[in-house]
Image: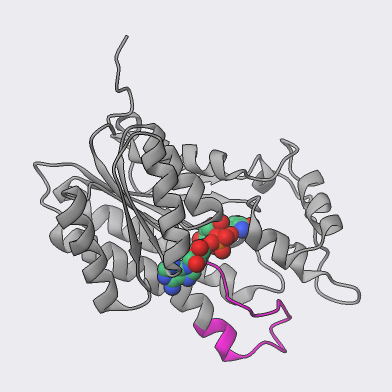
Amino acid sequence: MEQDLLGLAGRTVLVTGAGQGGGRGIALAFARAGAAVAVCDLEGERAEAVAAEVRALGVSALALTADVRDETAVAGMIDAATASLGIVDVLVNNVGNYGAHAPGPVTEIGWDFWQTAIDLNLRSTFLCSQAFARVHPGPDREGAIVNVASLSGVRASPGKAPYGAAKAAVIHLTKTLALELAPRRIRVNCVAPTGIEGPSLTAAASKSSIEAMRASIPLGALCSPESLGDCVLMLASRLARFVTGEVVMCDGGASLTTARAGIPLGEGHRPELGH
Ligand SMILES: NC(=O)c1ccc[n+]([C@@H]2O[C@H](COP(=O)([O-])OP(=O)(O)OC[C@H]3O[C@@H](n4cnc5c(N)ncnc54)[C@H](O)[C@@H]3O)[C@@H](O)[C@H]2O)c1
């Protein structure tokens, strides 16, 4: 039997926002596949903790503290990962969300909500992809970028218009990058999860809201960090060597149904339920 079916053993991956939640799940998935992992997070202690978990799986890890909205910090992050772990073969743009902004209808939200969503989701994805592509040595060495979008970027996103639009832009950017970088054999794909089990969802939604979300998903569960990690791993791996510019729904079938945990904007609307 072939030992390294995924082709990731001994490769180097950089995961942004890997200090908790889905990003941590992605970092650990790559570690289990034998890749060295650069664990990037705005919060240094979180990055250190996950890097220690990666090392415990028997592979190299580097904790990096960087703000992926900052062009200089992003270039430094790629340089530091390369210097410590070797050429970065895979970039996972996982940072995203919309900060502390409360969901609300378009008639009430301000531009600051838009700016936060654009910076955290689109700006970060662009800056990291650009920095990665600038130094990646392809086409003799294959590379891959996997972006983490959201179900919110695929279907209407009531209460979270800036987030949905920014994630839709990430999906579009994925396709353009895929075409531009194909001659250099850098594949670019995207994963669109439904609600991810973890601290950010627990902080944003009540227990009953989360339960309603779970009940609306055909496979009957939220996206676990492990499920997200494996989906990203698959797209970065040799198994997907002829796949580029794709969006893979990691949503338990949620996008296939009209069932939604939230109800339309209007009286009694519960925007925190959209996912
Ligand atoms: N949580 C969900 O329900 C859900 C649903 C669909 C899609 N997503 C997407 O999945 C991805 C992961 O979400 P999550 O909820 O697991 O993450 P999270 O919010 O739990 O963790 C994100 C990590 O990123 C770090 N971070 C934040 N801003 C940063 C910055 N500017 N630079 C570097 N690091 C930064 C944080 O410190 C944190 O450790 C995001 O792109 C999110 O939009 C999440």
Residue visible at 46% across and 54% down in the picture: 49
In the picture as drawn, the residue positioned furthest to the top comes out as: 1
In the picture as drawn, the residue positioned furthest to the right comes out as: 267
* Residue 113 included in the magenta stretch of the image: yes
Q: Position of residue 53 (x, y in %)?
A: 44, 44
- Residues 28 and 58: in front is 58
Q: Is residue 13 above or below residue 169?
A: above
The answer to whether 182 appears left or right of 3 in the picture is: left
Task: Assign the magenta stretch its main secondary structure.
Answer: loop
- Quarter of image, res 179: bottom left
Residue visible at 72% across and 40% down in the picture: 221
Q: Is residue 138 above or below residue 252?
A: below
Q: Position of residue 164 (x, y in %)?
A: 58, 68
Residue visible at 29% across and 14% down in the picture: 2
* Residue 65 included in the magenta stretch of the image: no
Residue range of the region highlighted in magenta in the rendering:
95-115
Q: Position of residue 246 (x, y in %)?
A: 41, 46
- Residues 181 and 131: in front is 131
- Quarter of image, res 256: top right
Residue visible at 22% across and 70% down in the picture: 75
The answer to whether 67 appears left or right of 73 in the picture is: right
The answer to whether 6 appears left or right of 180 in the picture is: right
